[in-house]
């Protein structure tokens, strides 16, 4: 909580009211093993990192944006909100589902004030965090890092595009959503997953 308050204060001191807020923070440090190993400490950590950090940042920055009557917010969720890896990241998936629901409600609340709120939900992305997840699975299962990556992709039924997306590809989507080219888009979720989620 303290970090969010400090970050928001630094933004306000540097630029006043921001025009754009992109919340990308997320991840999981919970052990694999499903619901049985997730005590309240792990649940709290998942909710703090994957939901409440965004809520706090919005609460700190939105008032000035609303006063200006203009702005765009993007929250980064995950396809795991729809396809949870119950063995490895159940708490993370639940927290990201809550973030997506919160984002929809927030978009309805602030739209009349000129603020747009959208969600980007990545699938497999070649990030340091994804590599860390693969490493945790590898250690827990006694398999190689590459085998763990293949299990992650296979657990989703595979990735029809046959590769994970690069971080820059996600950034391009976010850049569009915060631009004036997306001025009529709010309250929407955009999936970037190589067609992993089997439905639209």
Image (cartoon, rainbow, N blue to C red):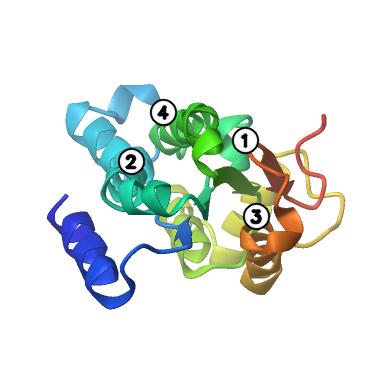
Which of 156 and 122 lies nearest the eye of the viewer? 122
How far apart, in angstroms, are the residues tagged by discs 1 and 4? 31 Å
How far apart, in angstroms, are the residues tagged by discs 2 and 4? 26 Å
Question: Is the residue under label 4 in contact with that under label 1 (CB below 8 Å)?
Answer: no
In the rendered structure, the answer to whether residue 119 lies left or right of residue 153 reads left
The residue to which callout 4 is attached is 34
Circle 2 SS class: helix
Circle 1 SS class: loop
Question: Is the residue under label 3 in contact with that under label 1 (CB below 8 Å)?
Answer: no
Near mark 2 (Cα within 10 A), the count class, few <14, some 14-19 or many ≥20, is: some
Residue at far top of view: 36
The residue to which callout 1 is attached is 187
Q: Earlier in the sequence, mark 2 or mark 4?
A: 4
Foreground tag (1 vs 4)? 1
Query: Residue 100 placed where, x, y %?
Result: 52, 34
Q: Is residue 74 visible?
A: yes
Query: Residue 188 placed where, x, y %?
Result: 67, 37
Circle 3 SS class: loop
The residue to which callout 2 is attached is 55
Foreground tag (1 vs 3)? 1
- Mark linked to residue 96: none
How far apart, in angstroms, are the residues tagged by discs 2 and 1? 16 Å
Image quadrant containing the C terminus: top right
């Amino acid at each position: 909580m303290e970090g969010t308050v400090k970050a928001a204060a630094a933004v306000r001191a540097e630029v006043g009211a921001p025009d754009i807020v992109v919340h990308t923070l997320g991840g999981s440090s919970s052990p694999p093993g499903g619901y049985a190993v997730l005590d309240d400490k792990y649940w709290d950590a998942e909710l703090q990192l994957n939901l409440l950090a965004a809520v706090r940042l919005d609460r700190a920055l939105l008032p000035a944006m609303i006063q200006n009557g203009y702005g765009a917010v993007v929250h980064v969720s995950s396809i795991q909100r729809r396809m949870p890896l119950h063995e490895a990241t159940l708490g993370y998936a639940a927290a990201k589902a809550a973030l997506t629901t919160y984002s929809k409600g927030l978009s309805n609340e602030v739209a009349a004030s000129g603020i747009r709120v959208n969600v980007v939900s990545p699938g497999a992305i070649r990030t340091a965090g994804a590599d860390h997840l693969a490493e945790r699975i590898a250690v827990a299962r006694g398999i190689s890092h590459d085998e763990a990556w293949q299990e992650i992709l296979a657990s989703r039924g595979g990735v029809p595009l046959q590769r994970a997306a690069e971080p820059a590809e996600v950034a391009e989507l976010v850049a569009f959503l915060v631009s004036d080219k997306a001025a009529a888009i709010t309250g929407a979720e955009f999936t970037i997953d190589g067609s992993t989620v089997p439905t639209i």
